[in-house]
């Protein structure tokens, strides 16, 4: 079986690795891929312009690919799934109509309001003065979001009115995110603990994947600006069985029903970014129309079912109700370049990768490329995601941090506290462990 994966980040390396682990799979093509997918067993990078949908379809036919997985949001929002389906090519991902849930925060908010899906109260603005007047009326804390795609960086959680007004001026006045910021959604600040709830949906059936939690802020202690994600772990203990049931009933099933009612059935991964309040009630912070990055890396490290089998059953509309998971936690620490998120430095050599071959650790690549003579060079803001399994989250964290310490990249940044909420819970549940960890 041959598979084509579209994308070139950490998520796509993890998807490719998971597919390649299945003995039925003979080749995984990744377009454009990264150094990780170039080096991975059975995987091959394709120099393909993925914005040229006809060229993607032509490559699928030429290479004898059985199905395509579309990883990132941009090609989904651009309608790659629609265009491949029009050529009878089996593909896993949402159509352009469904991908609007991520492509436009205003669309997502209207969709949630219409379908009674719990989320923060919000208003959308295009005129800077109106937005400022709203901020002054509402006060802080308040959250300012660029309407369109901004690689996870278009959100400012403003703790003061002045900060909120600066964000409004940056987006609506100075065009900080270009067209993506020409409209802003301003929403109430939600309190609680975040979790990532990711499902596979085949139009009708829902297969919830293992839960996870990511860390969006650049600095330890969840401080500093938002990033695409500095690390993640699975499972997320905040999603208890009761919370899981509420998310399915109040969020996921309503999305499936509403998209069917609109005549645009949802197919592919659906990611609900949630805030779980003190009472255990979930509120949607955002929808993504894809697997999370870096959540994919720890989640897939725990997957014991075959990912290609699950995706093929999803494409056929016959998803099983559950997948098999390793009960132990997995935790991924992102190594980011110097200057990330504002101004990442790229093109530097990375060393220390070759020594890592243990089965409880996997170094997924993100912004990397092959240089001369087999060198691996940084090529983006988030460079690697060092992912480890452990008997506990604390053990997985210390293993991942230990491996990060063996890798060198000039000016690299990583957080040593990924998973801190889960580790605090482990210590509270079993204080005797304190000395061991
Ligand atoms: P988003 O890109 O919409 O997921 O937002 C990025 C991050 O900003 C989220 O993961 C939260 O940490 C934070 N955030 C977004 N919206 C809110 C909100 N309404 N209240 C509190 N924090 C938020
Ligand atoms: N880790 C957050 C995201 O994938 O959007």
Image: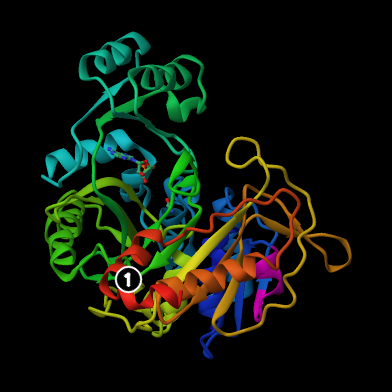
* Left or right of 23 in this view: 133: left
User: What is the span of residues highlighted in magenta in the rendered image?
Assistant: 35-43
Q: Do we see residue 300 in this rendering?
A: no
Numbered disc 1: secondary structure: helix
Relative image position of residue 145 (x, y in whole percent): 37, 31
Q: Which colour scheme appears in the figure? A: rainbow
Q: Residues within 10 Å of mark 1 (few under 14, many from 20)?
A: some
As drawn, 164 above or below 201:
above
Outermost residue to the bottom: 23
Instruction: Specify whether residue 285 is painted magenta.
Output: no
Residue at 40% x, 85% y is 304
Relative image position of residue 96 (x, y in whole percent): 37, 48
- Rendered-image quadrant of the N terminus: bottom right
As drawn, 303 above or below 185:
below
**Which residue is more in the foreground, 343 or 272?**
343
Asked where in the image residue 197 lies, by quadrant, the reply is bottom left
Q: Which residue is mark 1?
A: 426
* Left or right of 380 in this view: 122: left
Ligand 1's quadrant: top left
Say if disc 1 is inside 8 Å of ligand 1: no
**Which residue is more in the foreground, 82 or 212?**
212
**Which residue is more in the foreground, 95 or 280?**
280
Residue at 31% x, 16% y is 131
Relative image position of residue 106 (x, y in whole percent): 29, 33
Instruction: Specify whether residue 41 is painted magenta.
Output: yes
Asked where in the image residue 122 lies, by quadrant, the reply is top left
As drawn, 118 above or below 206:
above
Outermost residue to the right: 373
Q: Do we see residue 136 in this rendering?
A: yes
Relative image position of residue 30 (x, y in whole percent): 61, 66
């Amino acid at each position: 079986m041959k598979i084509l994966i579209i994308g070139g980040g950490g998520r796509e390396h993890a998807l490719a690795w998971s597919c390649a682990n299945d003995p039925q799979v003979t080749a995984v093509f990744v377009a454009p891929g990264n150094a990780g997918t170039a080096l991975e067993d059975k995987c091959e990078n394709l120099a393909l312009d993925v914005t040229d949908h006809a060229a993607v379809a032509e490559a699928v036919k030429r290479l004898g690919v059985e199905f395509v997985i579309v990883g990132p949001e941009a090609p989904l929002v651009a309608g790659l799934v629609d265009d491949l389906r029009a050529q009878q090519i089996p593909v896993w991902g949402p159509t352009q109509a469904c991908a609007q849930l991520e492509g436009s925060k205003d669309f997502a908010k209207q969709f949630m309001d219409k379908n009674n899906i719990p989320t923060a109260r919000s208003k959308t603005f295009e005129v800077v003065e109106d937005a400022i007047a709203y901020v002054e009326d509402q006060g802080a804390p308040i959250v300012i979001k660029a309407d369109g795609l901004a690689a996870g960086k278009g959100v400012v959680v403003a703790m003061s009115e002045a900060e909120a007004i600066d964000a409004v001026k940056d987006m609506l006045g100075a065009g900080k995110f270009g067209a993506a910021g020409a409209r802003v959604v301003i929403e109430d600040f939600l309190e609680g603990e975040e979790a990532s709830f990711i499902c596979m949906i085949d139009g009708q059936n829902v297969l919830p994947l293992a839960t996870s939690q990511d860390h969006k802020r650049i600095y330890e202690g969840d401080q500093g600006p938002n990033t695409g994600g500095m690390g993640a772990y699975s499972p997320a203990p905040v999603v208890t069985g009761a919370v899981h049931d509420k998310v399915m009933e109040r969020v996921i099933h309503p999305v499936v029903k509403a998209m069917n009612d609109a005549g645009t059935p949802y197919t592919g991964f659906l990611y609900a970014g949630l805030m779980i309040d003190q009472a255990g009630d979930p509120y949607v912070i955002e929808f993504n129309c894809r697997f999370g990055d870096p959540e994919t890396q720890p989640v897939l490290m725990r997957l014991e079912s075959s990912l290609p089998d699950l995706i093929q059953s999803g494409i056929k509309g016959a998803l099983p109700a559950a997948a098999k998971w390793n009960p132990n936690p997995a935790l991924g620490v992102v190594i980011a370049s110097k200057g990330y998120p504002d101004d990442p430095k790229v093109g530097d050599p990375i060393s220390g990768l070759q020594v890592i071959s243990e089965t409880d650790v996997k170094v997924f690549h993100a912004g990397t490329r092959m240089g001369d003579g087999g060198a691996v060079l940084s090529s983006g803001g988030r460079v690697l995601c060092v992912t480890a399994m452990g008997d506990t989250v604390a053990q997985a964290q210390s293993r991942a941090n230990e491996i990060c310490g063996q890798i060198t990249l000039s000016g690299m940044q990583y957080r040593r506290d990924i998973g801190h909420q889960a580790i605090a819970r482990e210590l509270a549940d079993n204080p005797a462990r304190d000395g061991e960890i």
